[in-house]
Amino acid sequence: MKKLVTYGSWLTISGLLLIASCQRKSEPALFASDLTYAQPTLETAEGTAIKSSRPGLTGTAPFTFALTSRPATTALSVDTDGVISASEKLAPGTYQVSLTVTNPAGTQSFDNVLAVLVNSKSGVTFVKDVLPITRVNCSFAGCHPNFLKYQEVAGTITKMLDRVQRAKGSSGFMPRERDALTTTQIGTLKQWVADGMKER
């Protein structure tokens, strides 16, 4: 009789464990969400590699990550933990990084989760870097013909940066009737200011 009770108890316990195990397996996987980096902007100098922290992320593991950037480059990568690396080959400029995360629930996209700013080692100057931008995009009849001159651009750079970062077609957007400046061009203008707005 004692053996029968023990055997029955074992069967009962095993059945409960089996039910509990099945219940756990039936829980739906959660999509990846709330992907954030503690430091949303990485800043480095030309020729110097840098890595982000591991991102905060909720959802059902395991996760896999795929990276895209604007402008596109092969010098940015992401590892299996979501850590983003910028190699020493990344050219000066500002890069907006987006991630695609896949887990058992499916695939989610996260746009512009990290900005990578690479400062020019030699320093940005008006003649070398800024003038080629203003000559093509600003200095034409009906717009800003004086933007070939250092003094004119240096005196209005704050307003210029505001206008070129507005949405195309919105009030005050620059350059008028032309395509928006690229992220790299805007990054060059910002870096020129950061470097002290050198003329040469």
Image (spheres, helix red, strand yellow):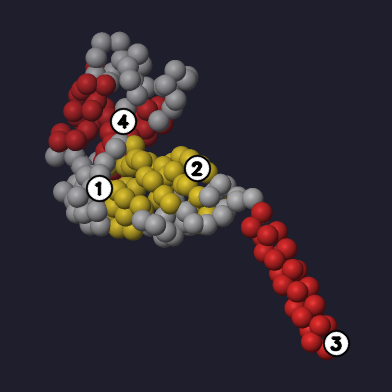
Looking at the rendered image, the disc whose residue lies closer to the viewer, 1 or 2, is: 2
Residue 63, horizontal then vertical, whole percent:
47, 54
Q: Residue at x 26, y 21 (%)?
A: 137
CB under 8 Å between discs 3 and 2: no
Amino acid at pointer 2: Thr
* Residue 195 visible, this orientation: no
Q: Quadrant for residue 162, please give it.
A: top left
Q: Is residue 169 above or below residue 110?
A: above
Amino acid at pointer 1: Ala
Q: Check residue 1 in the rendering and tell me which mark sits there, or answer none.
A: 3
Answer few, some or many: residues within 10 Å of disc 3's Cα (few below 14, many 20 plus, some between 14 and 19): few
Which comes before the other along the chain, label 4 or label 3? Answer: 3
* CA distance separating discs 3 and 2: 57 Å
Residue 78, horizontal then vertical, whole percent:
35, 52
Residue 178, horizontal then vertical, whole percent:
32, 17
Q: Which residue is mark 4?
A: 182
Amino acid at pointer 4: Thr
**Which residue occupies the foreground of this view, 180 or 87?**
87
Amino acid at pointer 3: Met
Answer few, some or many: residues within 10 Å of disc 2's Cα (few below 14, many 20 plus, some between 14 and 19): some
Q: As drawn, is 1 to the left or to the right of 172?
A: right
Q: Quadrant for residue 12, please give it.
A: bottom right
Q: Residue at x 44, y 18 (%)?
A: 169
Q: Which residue is mark 1?
A: 75
Q: Which residue is mark 2?
A: 107
Looking at the rendered image, the disc whose residue lies closer to the viewer, 4 or 3, is: 3
**Which residue occupies the foreground of this view, 183 or 133?**
183
Looking at the rendered image, the disc whose residue lies closer to the viewer, 2 or 4, is: 2
